[in-house]
Amino acid sequence: MDQRQAWHIKVACPFLVSRKKVVKPGELERAIEQTLRNRENVRAILVLLDADKDKPEELIPKLLQRCQKATSLPTAVVFARKEFEAWFLGAKESLRGLRGIRKDAVAPDDPETIQGAKERLSENMIPGRGYIETDDQPAFAAVFDLEKAQARCRSFNKFLREVERLVAEMQND
C-alpha cells in the first residue's frame, strides 16, 4: 500500500492571493497571518504558485525565508512549472467526461512546457464549454490521477515531496 493512502490530513480552505500580489514584500506574511487567524488547528503552511515565466530556484529561497519569519510552523513553497493546470493536462485521461472534458482527450507529451495550460484545457472540452478556473480547478483537483501527473510533471513530484516532508514534520511534533 502506498504510504500516502494512510495520511489523514484535513486541508483547510485555501487562502487565495493573486500571484502578482503574494511576491510583494509584506503580502505573503499578511496572508500567513490571516490564514492562522481565520483557520483552526493549522499545523503547516504550503505556498503553491504558478511559475509562469519566473525561475522558481531564485524565488523559492526568498519566499521560504519570508514564510519562516512569519510563522514557526513547518512551511514549504512549491511552484507549478508554468501553470498549476499543467498537472491536469498531465493526468487528462483521468478527467475524461468530467466538467466538459472530451471522452477522447489525451495528455500531451510534456504538459509542463505548455504556456497556456488553461486554454489547452478549454480546447479539450466539448463545444460551447471552456475551462473556468474557479469552478473547474477544485473539481479537477479532487479527482485527477496523481500517478499520471507524477509520471508526466516534475513540479508535481516536487509538490508531493514537499507535502511528504510537511506530513513527516507534523508527525514529529
Image (tube, grey):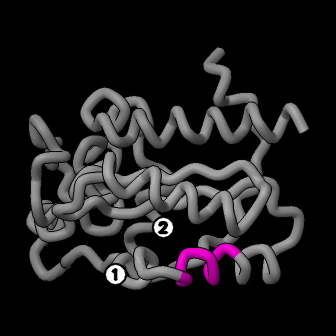
Task: Identify the image quadrant of the N terminus.
Answer: top right
List x then y, in percent, for residue 164: 62, 33
Disc 2/disc 1 C-alpha distance (Å): 21 Å
Alpha-carbon neighbours of circle 2 within 10 Å: few (<14), some, or many (≥20)? few
* Labels 2 & 1 near each other (Cβ < 8 A): no
Q: Please report the residue visible at 35 percent of the width from the left and 60 percent of the height from the top.
A: 98
List x then y, in percent, for residue 14: 60, 71
Q: To which quarter of the image does residue 28 belong?
A: bottom right
Is 168 or 60 nearer to us in this picture? 60
Is 88 or 16 nearer to us in this picture? 16
Taking the image as shown, residue 49 lies to the left or right of residue 111, namely right
Q: On screen, 82 above or below 39?
A: above
Q: Which amino acid does label 1 sit on?
A: Lys
Q: On screen, 137 above or below 96?
A: below
List x then y, in percent, for residue 48: 47, 59
Residue mark closest to the camera, 2 vs 1? 1
Q: Main secondary structure of the magenta part?
A: helix
Q: In this orientation, does residue 88 appear? A: no
Label for residue 138? 2
Is 54 or 114 nearer to us in this picture? 54
Task: Identify the image quadrant of the C terminus.
Answer: top right
Say what secondary structure mark 1 lies in: helix
Q: Which amino acid does label 2 sit on?
A: Pro
Label for residue 113? none
List x then y, in percent, for residue 38: 79, 82
Label for residue 20? 1
Q: Please report the residue visible at 37 percent of the width from the left and 53 percent of the height from the top.
A: 79
Q: Please report the residue visible at 72 percent of the width from the left and 38 percent of the height from the top.
A: 167
Q: In this orientation, does residue 89 appear? A: yes
Per the rendered image, the range of residues in magenta is 26-32
